[in-house]
Image (cartoon, rainbow, N blue to C red):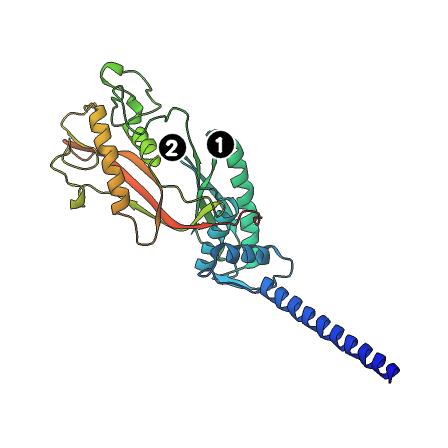
Amino acid sequence: MKKSRIIMGTLALAVAAVVIIACNKEKAEIKTSAETETVSKEDDMSTYLKQFKEKMQSAAKGNETLSMEDARWHLEAVLNYTYGDAGHQTSDVQCDTLYCALHTEGKEVTLAQLNEAFEALSYDVEKAYVNCDLPDKSVLAIQASFENESKDGDVIVRSILSLRGLTSFTNTMWFDSTDYWYPCYYYGKCGEYVGQYVNERGAETELTRMLNLRVPQPGYAYGHAYYTDYEEFETAYYMDSYLVDPLSPCGYKIFKETVYYEHLPHTCISPDEMNYYLGKGVELMNHYAPEGKVIVSCRYEWNLWTNLLPYDTFHDAFFKYANVHYTNIGNED
């Protein structure tokens, strides 16, 4: 009887061990399955792009193809996921235009072909970053478009790389008593400060810097911030009644001047007027924001209608918007 009990006890232990091993194996299989499960970009953009990038760079990607628009979107998104580091206060934005050839299969692009374009653009992005002399620099945005489709279906990829930085002189959020500026940067400061910063800075460059300082920065607690799905809006004072303001120095929320003589410039924008346009710039970037998207950057450009006298000179305002995402700290490529 005692021997029988020993045998039964041994069998029970053996069964328990088999059950434990089976359970552990099942858990391991579940864990492995969960780790390799493909997620959608709607559920988790960063994981989706991480998995897509790994698949695109894998030797086992096969002959999988994407439509032209899907290829453009994925190329742009993976570039931003890889290099984007937008969660910083910004005063200056430096833009470079990058080009590369993208070979296609008719109206489709294979993952191998897309990876070739990604590698070529990655080299150019990294080279432009090294050559950029902005302080506290990082990649703000990369926008890709397909151009110049040839007879064999190949295209040229045109990418706008925006690098950001924070200059040391931006130690105030408002213009001070010395900020008298001509509308265009060619002419620098005016009034009693005439002759300063000629061909270097002007009202539109200073408004651009000050307004970018006011762009809300994406939270950094979840990792590097990066953008996808860009949209850009350009103001047009002659078409948009929202820009009219009777209390404005010029009647509009952006600078505008009618010039009756050929010699330019005529107006010297005072510090109070600069601060007016700066405050309205914040209003405009919020007003034109597409639903669900955040502001990426702002830019003012001096423009001129040159048909017949009188001329209209004015500042165009450009606002770039996008969807914001985050990579996970400690889980980045």
Q: Quadrant of residue 171?
A: top left
Q: Which residue is mark 1?
A: 132
Q: Residues within 10 Å of mark 2 (few under 14, many from 20)?
A: many
Using residue 317 as the reference point, say whether residue 20 is left or right of it: right
x then y, percent, for residue 90: 40, 35
Residue type (three-letter) at the residue carrying disc 1: Cys
Residue type (three-letter) at the residue carrying disc 2: Ser
Residue depicted at x 41% and y 25%: 168
The residue lying furthest to the front in this view is: 2
The residue lying furthest to the bottom in this view is: 1
Q: Quadrant of residue 317?
A: top left
The number of discs equals 2
Q: From the viewer's perspective, is the residue at label 1 or at label 2 nearer?
A: 2
The residue lying furthest to the left in this view is: 246
Quadrant assignment for the N terminus: bottom right
Using residue 74 as the reference point, say whether residue 320 is left or right of it: left
Cβ atoms under marks 1 and 2 closer than 8 Å = no
Between 147 and 302, which is closer to the camera in this rendering? 302
Residue depicted at x 42% and y 44%: 219
Q: Which residue is mark 2?
A: 91
Give above or below for 40 relative to 261.
below
Q: Judging from the image, what secondary structure is the residue with disc 2 in?
A: loop
x then y, percent, for residue 269: 21, 25
Q: Does the image show residue 150?
A: no
x then y, percent, for residue 281: 26, 38
The residue lying furthest to the top in this view is: 192
Q: Residues within 10 Å of mark 1 (few under 14, many from 20)?
A: some
x then y, percent, for residue 11: 80, 79
Give above or below for 107 relative to 236.
below
